[in-house]
Amino acid sequence: MYKGNNHFVIIGWNERVKNLLSYLDDSLFLNKMVLIDNTLEETHLLPDHIYFIKGDPQDTETLVKANIKHATTLLITADPDQLEEEADLNSILSLIANRGQNPSIYSIVEILTPKHSVNAKHAGADQIIHRSLPIGNLMYDKMFNEQMLN
């Protein structure tokens, strides 16, 4: 169980997250990041400074292990192994589950289909990332924009 607070929670391990972490190499926030993923088998691929929790990001037990109640920021990435529609629905369900545990968490959600952008907003997403944009740069900008840091 992660015992820190004021941390970042990232849901999903994929190339976009890997790219994002390369932008964070010199960041002071690196020791305050928790990754939740239920498909990652080889944790040696993760940077040493990431606290990893294998589990379902929609499950209360997994969210308790991530100490989601005391996290400040949530980044949900779309699952590249699912169809776009399914990935979006799972991202939105993950958002709802996390918001249920921490209603004030700043939430950034990657959405693949335009029609689900509205649904993600209704579910409480503060920021939506669309796949067509340069994801690594955009995720970094969204995580560290002025609004979130204030």
Image (cartoon, helix red, strand yellow):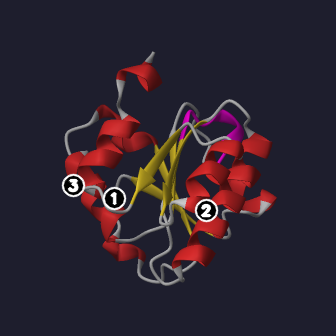
Q: Secondary structure at mark 2?
A: helix
Give residue 7's position: percent from left, percent from top. 51, 37
State the quadrant of the N terminus: bottom right
Tell me what residue is drawn at x 54 percent, y 83 percent: 83
Q: Which residue is mark 3?
A: 22
Q: Quadrant of residue 61?
A: bottom right
Give residue 9's position: percent from left, percent from top. 53, 48
Amino acid, disc 1: Asp
Residue 49 visible somewhere in the drawing: yes
State the quadrant of the C terminus: top left
Per the model, the C-alpha gap separating discs 1 and 2 is 26 Å
Which label was assigned to residue 91?
2
Amino acid, disc 3: Ser
Tell me what residue is drawn at x 39 percent, y 38 percent: 143
Residue 1 visible somewhere in the drawing: no
* Mark closest to the chain's N terminus, 1 or 2: 1
How packed mark 2 is, by other alpha carbons closer than 10 Å (few <14, some 14-19, many 20 or more), is: many
Query: Where 74 sits versus 28, above or below?
Result: below
Which label was assigned to residue 36?
none
* Mark closest to the chain's N terminus, 1 or 3: 3
Q: Are marks 1 and 2 in contact (CB under 8 Å)?
A: no
Q: Which residues are magenta?
A: 66-73
Tell me what residue is drawn at x 73 percent, y 37 percent: 102
Which label was assigned to residue 48?
1
Query: Where 145 sits versus 108, above or below?
Result: above
Closer to the eye: label 1 or 3? 3
Give residue 124's position: percent from left, percent from top. 67, 41
Find the residue positioned furthest to the front.
115
